[in-house]
């Protein structure tokens, strides 16, 4: 007759052996994901440190003059450039401006979803 303890020990050994490498691979992927997100965070931080600080009432005049390159983050500059392209193409409709706002908002939410997924 087989010993029940030996049978359980063998079953636990087989389960743990079969999960060893997949667990290590998932840990490696999670570590690489943390490295990538840390790099993105550091790049954003360095960019914000290098920005020239202005009072909030001066920023609209900088945008109108087109001199916002060292005062605003790259995401804001990209949005302003898309808005300028839309305005240079003629008189934009309300729908075109609303689509630009919604696309930008959706992209921002998606980037936040990626970070919140990493925190789970």
Image (tube, helix red, strand yellow):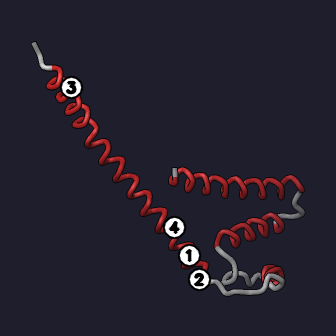
Spatial distance from mark 1 to mark 3, Cα to Cα?
53 Å
Q: Nearer the viewer, mark 2 or mark 3?
A: 3
Q: Is residue 87 left or right of residue 116?
A: right
Q: Nearer the viewer, mark 1 or mark 3?
A: 3
Local crowd size for mark 3, using a 10 Å CA cut-off: few (<14), some (14–19), many (≥20): few
The residue that mark 2 highlights is: 49
The residue that mark 4 highlights is: 40
The residue that mark 3 highlights is: 8
**Which comes before the other along the chain, label 3 or label 4?**
3
**Which comes before the other along the chain, label 1 or label 4?**
4
**Which comes before the other along the chain, label 2 or label 3?**
3
Q: Where's residue 114, x and y in %?
A: 56, 53
Q: Is 111 placed above or below 72 here?
A: above
Spatial distance from mark 2 to mark 3, Cα to Cα?
59 Å
User: Quarter-wise, where is residue 93 in the image?
Assistant: bottom right
Residue at the limit of the structure toward the left, as seen here = 1
Q: Is 67 placed above or below 3 here?
A: below
**Which comes before the other along the chain, label 2 or label 4?**
4
The residue that mark 1 highlights is: 45
Confirm or deny contact between disc 1 and disc 2 (CB under 8 A): yes
- Which element is circle 1 on? helix
User: Quarter-wise, where is residue 100 in the image?
Assistant: bottom right
Q: Is residue 119 left or right of residue 62?
A: left
């Amino acid at each position: 007759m087989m010993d029940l303890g030996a049978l359980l020990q063998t079953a636990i050994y087989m389960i743990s052996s079969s999960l060893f490498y997949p667990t290590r691979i998932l840990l490696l992927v999670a570590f690489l994901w943390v490295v990538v997100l840390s790099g993105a965070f550091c790049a954003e931080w360095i960019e914000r440190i290098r920005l020239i600080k202005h009072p909030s009432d001066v920023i609209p005049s900088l945008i109108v003059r087109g001199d916002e390159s060292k005062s605003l983050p790259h995401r804001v500059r990209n949005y302003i450039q898309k808005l300028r392209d839309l305005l240079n193409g003629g008189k934009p409709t309300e729908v075109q401006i609303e689509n630009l706002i919604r696309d930008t908002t959706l992209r921002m939410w998606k980037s936040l979803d990626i970070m919140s997924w990493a925190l789970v």
